[in-house]
């Protein structure tokens, strides 16, 4: 059995590079916090690479510098069982790099990876915050209500 080739890399503005995998734990935590997602501890972030089905991130290299100065500026990942259920998570773009299509590139890449590597008929979900709704709708996502409604336990529920 051959491994399917990865989906084509969507075009990015100059200076940006799409990378498979995950940013460092420090960069992951920084991307979450600075982009407005809820902050996570180092212990919460540590299992991300091994507990995810796939992930990608975008780095930025300022003009006239070498690639060692690349900084992670956007990311996303897929949590799933590899067969049917896939959850798009941790979609984040640093504010200084927003409005350049980076979130769209990450999302399209993640969806392309699912199309290429998952069996036919995958169930793909995500939780959309206000700023991301337009991006997700543009890429074919629709509200699950009234048939389904996302629910969550409040943070700290296990201590109470």
Image (cartoon, rainbow, N blue to C red):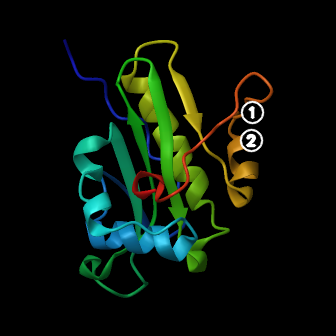
Most extreme residue toward the right, as rendered? 146
Q: Is residue 146 above or below residue 8?
A: above
Please name whichever residue, 70 or 128, is drawn nearer the observer in this view of the structure: 128
Please name whichever residue, 14 or 20, is drawn nearer the observer in this view of the structure: 20
Residue 152, horizontal then vertical, whole percent: 57, 44
Q: Looking at the rendered structure, which numbered label has been put on residue 142?
A: 1
Could you classify mark 1 by the number of other residues whose Cα lies within 10 Å: few (under 14), some (14-19), or many (20 or more)? few
- Residue at the location (69% across, 35% down)? 141
Please name whichever residue, 12 or 151, is drawn nearer the observer in this view of the structure: 151
Q: Can residue 10 be seen in this view?
A: no
Residue 64, horizontal then vertical, whole percent: 38, 88
- Quadrant into which the N terminus falls: top left
Do the CB atoms of the residues marked 2 and 1 lie less than 8 Å apart? yes
Q: Looking at the rendered structure, which numbered label has been put on residue 98?
A: none
Most extreme residue toward the bottom, as rendered? 64
The residue indicated by pointer 2 is 137
Q: Can residue 155 be seen in this view?
A: yes
């Amino acid at each position: 059995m051959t491994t399917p080739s990865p989906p084509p890399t969507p075009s990015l503005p100059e200076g940006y590079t799409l990378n498979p995998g995950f940013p460092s734990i420090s960069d992951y935590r920084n991307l979450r916090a600075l982009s407005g997602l809820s902050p996570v501890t180092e212990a919460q972030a540590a299992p991300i690479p091994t507990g995810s089905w796939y992930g990608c991130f975008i780095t930025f290299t300022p003009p006239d510098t070498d690639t060692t100065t690349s900084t992670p500026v956007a990311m996303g990942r897929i949590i799933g069982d590899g067969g049917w259920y896939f959850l798009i998570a941790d979609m984040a773009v640093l504010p200084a790099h927003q409005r350049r299509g980076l979130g769209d590139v990450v999302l399209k890449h993640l969806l392309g990876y699912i199309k290429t590597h998952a069996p036919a008929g995958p169930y793909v979900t995500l939780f959309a915050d206000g700023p991301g709704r337009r991006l997700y709708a543009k890429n074919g996502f629709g509200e699950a209500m009234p048939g389904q409604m996302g629910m969550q336990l409040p943070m700290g529920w296990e201590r109470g």
